[in-house]
């Protein structure tokens, strides 16, 4: 099976690190022009490095700064990308943060920050993407679908997570956002799906893998016995963005080395 995203334009939010970077590189190596979105001036250098790597590998991409939790910035990002590249074909709704706290100590700021990026950010980007998909209509020289949205959720859309109520709540909500959009825009040939990663080796969860002890207790949760890599998620994103997955919409696809099989039950229960 050959997969090509040639002629297609993809916005990857939160692409200056972690899973977003893995997805941006995978999409670019499959032929898409990739907008490497980053949230602030602080992440500009990382975003530039990624674009340079994409270009050195023969791909196409640009950096774009936008805080996805801010409506005016998201609207402008889509306007600018359409002005420069003609349209958007693929949205990877990836930007996400954690602000962990015991629930009784969780501040409203911690709650709002996580919901703002992880959920409101996905709402705002999906809304602008769908408006653009509908404006352009289906163009068979690009894809048989009118557009593709891939939400980056988490195993924590189904696994409760003590000490991370804001994060788990945002991921649970993404599932309903994703499925509602898939239902609402299926007839328009817009496909909407979620990728639900388990533990992937990125800066967001450094504490879970940077010592041997932490890694051992992490691996106890993963039947496949290895931590995931951004490239694992990149491969799935390419498939979900391509016409090879044209009959998949409204799905949460777990990519977690078996974490959602609840490994502790292999000996208990
Ligand atoms: C979180 C990581 C965590 C993983 C598995 C992800 O959604 O961002 O911090 O390691 O879930 O628990």
Image (cartoon, rainbow, N blue to C red):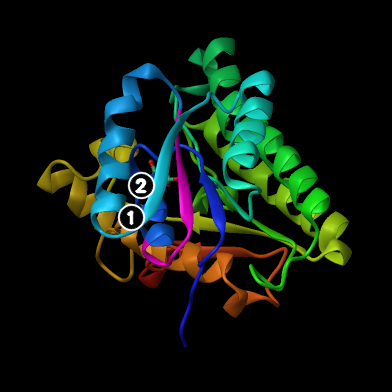
Magenta residues, start to end: 29-38
Where is residue 148? Give x, y as percent: 66, 59
Where is residue 17? Give x, y as percent: 33, 39
Residue 103 higher or lower than 119, as above or below: above
Residue in front for this viewpoint, 224 or 37: 37
Where is residue 218? Give x, y as percent: 27, 52
The reply to whether discs 1 and 2 touch (Cβ–Cβ < 8 Å) is yes
The residue tagged 2 is: 21
| Residue drawn where x is 70% and y is 33% of the image | 124
| Lower sequence index among marks 1 and 2 | 2
| Residue drawn where x is 30% and y is 60% of the image | 58
Left or right: 22 as drawn, with respect to 154: left
Visible in this render: residue 233?
no
Asked if the magenta segment contains residue 36, the reply would be yes
Task: Tell me the SS state at disc 1.
Answer: helix
Badge 1: residue crowd in 10 Å (few <14, some 14–19, many ≥20)? many
Residue in front for this viewpoint, 71 or 97: 71
Visible in this render: residue 247?
yes
Where is residue 160? Give x, y as percent: 54, 45
The residue tagged 1 is: 230
Task: Tell me the SS state at disc 2.
Answer: helix
Residue 207 higher or lower than 31, as above or below: above
């Amino acid at each position: 099976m050959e997969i090509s995203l040639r002629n297609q334009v993809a916005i990857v939010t939160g692409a200056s690190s972690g899973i977003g970077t893995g997805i941006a590189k995978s999409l670019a190596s499959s032929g898409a022009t990739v907008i490497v979105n980053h949230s602030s001036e602080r992440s500009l250098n990382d975003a530039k490095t990624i674009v340079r790597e994409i270009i050195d590998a023969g791909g196409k991409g640009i950096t774009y700064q936008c805080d996805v939790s801010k409506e005016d910035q998201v609207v402008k990002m889509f306007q600018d990308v359409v002005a420069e590249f003609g349209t958007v074909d693929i949205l990877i709704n990836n930007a996400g943060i954690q602000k962990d706290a015991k629930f009784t100590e969780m501040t409203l700021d911690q709650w709002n920050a996580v919901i703002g990026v992880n959920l409101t950010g996905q709402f705002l980007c999906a809304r602008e993407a769908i408006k653009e998909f509908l404006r352009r209509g289906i163009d068979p020289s690009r894809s048989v679908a009118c557009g593709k949205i891939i939400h980056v959720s988490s195993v924590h859309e189904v696994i409760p997570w003590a000490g991370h109520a804001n994060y788990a709540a945002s991921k649970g909500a993404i599932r309903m956002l994703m499925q509602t959009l898939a239902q609402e825009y299926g007839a328009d040939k817009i496909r909407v799906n979620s990728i639900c990663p388990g533990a992937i080796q990125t800066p967001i969860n450094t504490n879970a893998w940077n010592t041997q002890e932490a890694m051992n207790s992490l691996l106890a949760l993963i039947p496949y016995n290895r931590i995931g890599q951004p490239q694992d998620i990149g491969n799935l994103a390419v498939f979900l963005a391509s016409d090879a997955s044209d009959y998949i919409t409204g799905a949460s696809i777990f990519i977690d080395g078996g974490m959602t099989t609840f490994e502790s039950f292999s000996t208990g229960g």
